[in-house]
Amino acid sequence: MNTLVAPSTAAISAMIYMNYVNEIKYEDLVSCILSGAVAITAGCYTVSWWASAIIGFASSFFYFWSIWFVRKKLIIDDPLCVTSIHLFCGYFGGIVQGLFGNGTVGDAGLLYGGWWHFVVQLVGSIVIFVFEFGMGLILWYLILDIMIVNKCK
């Protein structure tokens, strides 16, 4: 049920936001539905339905913020918004799982009195990001050195 609630509420919040800014795009609506699905994936079995609704609702706002951040601050061309959906909303879902986890499987989240689970999710997300970023840089430089890649001059 949680994997249906989160994308549905993400779509609702996306329509609210897009109506507010007077720019309704079908692509952003579909991407927000995907961001809700990605955000709930980490905790779909460990959060309640109401927490799933909150996670989905917040994920679309997080998606729109991450689009702005990736395009304006990092200056990365991401036409399909894959970075915003999978990187940012995925990490958001992993961290809020430590916030809303109800303790049915594993430890309880921060809202249920289990501060340790939230710390584990936060530290785990940071460690995974550092590992992924480091390996990505190593592979990128190996590809640039070994293969012929079009380099901007």
Image: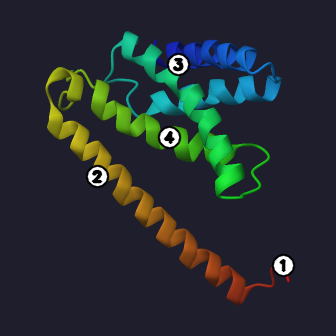
Which residue is at 51% across, 13% downward? 5
Q: Which mark is residue 90?
A: 4
Q: CA distance from mark 1 to mark 3?
A: 40 Å
- Is there a contact, CB below 8 Å, between mark 4 and mark 3? no
Q: Earlier in the sequence, mark 1 or mark 4?
A: 4
Q: Amino acid at mark 1?
A: Cys
Q: Judging from the image, what secondary structure is the residue with disc 1 in? A: loop
Which residue is at 21% across, 29% downward? 110
How many marks do you count on the picture? 4
Residue 110 visible (yes or no): yes
Q: CA distance from mark 2 to mark 1?
A: 36 Å
In which quadrant of the rendered image does the C terminus lie?
Answer: bottom right
Q: Where in the figure is residue 83, as x and y percent of width and height?
A: 63, 48
Extreme residue in the front direction: 21
Q: Earlier in the sequence, mark 2 or mark 3?
A: 3
Give the residue pinned by disc 2: 123
Give the residue pinned by disc 3: 57
Q: Which mark is residue 152?
A: 1
Q: CA distance from mark 2 to mark 3?
A: 24 Å
Residue 109 visible (yes or no): no
Q: Earlier in the sequence, mark 4 or mark 3?
A: 3
Q: Amino acid at mark 3?
A: Phe
